[in-house]
Amino acid sequence: MASPFAIPQEVQRTHPRPQGGPPSAWRGVSDRFSLVKPGIVGLVLATTLAGHWVAAAVAGAGSASPLTALWTLLGTGLTAAGAAALNNYCDRELDRLMARTRSRPLPARRLPAREALALGLGLSALGLALLALLVHPIAAGLALIALLAYVPLYTALKRRTPWAIGVGGVTGALPPLIGWVGATGHLAPEAWALFGLLFLWQLPHFWALALYKRSEYERAGLPVLPLTHGEDVTWGQIVLHTGALLPVALLPYPLGWTGPGYAVVAGLLSLGFLGLAWVGRRRPPGPERDRLARRLFLYSLVYLPLLSLALALGVGASAGSVRGVD
């Protein structure tokens, strides 16, 4: 039976396997660090902290233990790092086929694959154990769902369907819920606003990347939306999801988490996101449209940190004013 992570033979034949470079102590440390995808882990930690911060400020958890927050971040970070290493292990042959990933340590054969597998399993197990024993079983359960959705499910599905990004979006949207549970010991309905915000952000973020990098995805044989359904459908989906993101980004204000200042910032940022998507949707195929896709991708990278900063400041100011009234 073929592995769900296998690469078609006809694709493999057109991409010779790279040979590993000379070993060095620094390269070895750097390669092992890169296995856990520190940039992604940093984003996971930031969104986990955001969930914890919002819950502690507005959900009656103002006395949440700083030590519990530390264990929440450590457990979630270790689980995310383990998932990243396992993803590197599963994608090592696929990464060889794409210019932006073929220099990673596994496809370049600078590290043995079994090392990434052992690292991934060990970090994931340690992270889940910390969350279960020192934070809350619900937090550990959410982290386990994220791990399983990302590594076996999303990693296999992305080779078969362009809609696998929906599964990946769920994985990326769960960390703030883990942070919320770490602060409160339960998962409140309003916490799902943070989940929705992250989920809706990830889809246009990825589709913009897939649009201007579609030739690389085509060479790797990955069925991303621009290749399976065309540019117009992809831009239409980007407009649809950035449009849905606008009211979700504004939710913290009617929920009473923030004041009107946050609503203004969130509205302007989200309208900018939607406006860029709309302009790209109206352009005919060509180099200018590709440049717009790249610009949209870069805007998405700026959008989330700025929105998160506005939310943190808004929640902090709102909580401070409530304490002043009390």
Image (cartoon, rainbow, N blue to C red):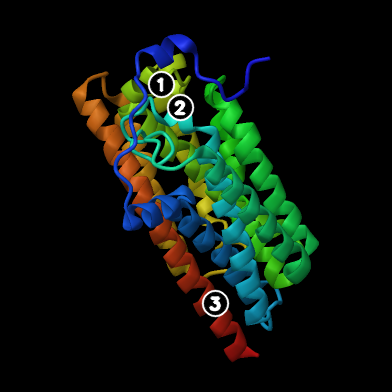
> Which of the two marks, 1 or 2, is nearer to us in this view?
2
Q: Is residue 68 above or below residue 162?
A: below
Q: Is residue 54 above or below residue 99?
A: below
The picture quadrant where one finds residue 101 is: top left
Residue at horizontal 60%, vertical 40%? 150
Q: Nearer the viewer, residue 105 or 208?
A: 105
Report helix, strand or loop for mark 2: helix
Q: Is residue 37 above or below residue 100?
A: below
Q: Amino acid at mark 1?
A: Ala
Residue 214 % position (x, y): 35, 24
Q: Residue furthest left?
A: 287
Residue at horizontal 60%, vertical 27%? 156
Residue 311 % position (x, y): 49, 66
Q: Amino acid at mark 2?
A: Leu
In this rendering, position of residue 113 left or right of residue 56: left
Residue 318 image label: 3
User: What residue is shown with label 1?
Assistant: 220
Instruction: State yes or no: discs 1 and 2 in contact (Cβ < 8 Å).
Output: yes
In this rendering, position of residue 201 left or right of residue 60: left
Q: Amino acid at mark 3?
A: Ser
3 or 2: tag closer to the N-terminus:
2
Instruction: State yes or no: discs 3 and 2 in contact (Cβ < 8 Å).
Output: no
The picture quadrant where one finds residue 109 is: top left
| Image quadrant in which the N terminus is located | top right
Residue at horizontal 50%, vertical 79%? 317
Q: Nearer the viewer, residue 269 or 103?
A: 103
Residue 94 image label: 2
Report helix, strand or loop for mark 1: helix
> Which of the two marks, 3 or 2, is nearer to us in this view?
2
Circle count: 3
| Image quadrant in which the C terminus is located | bottom right
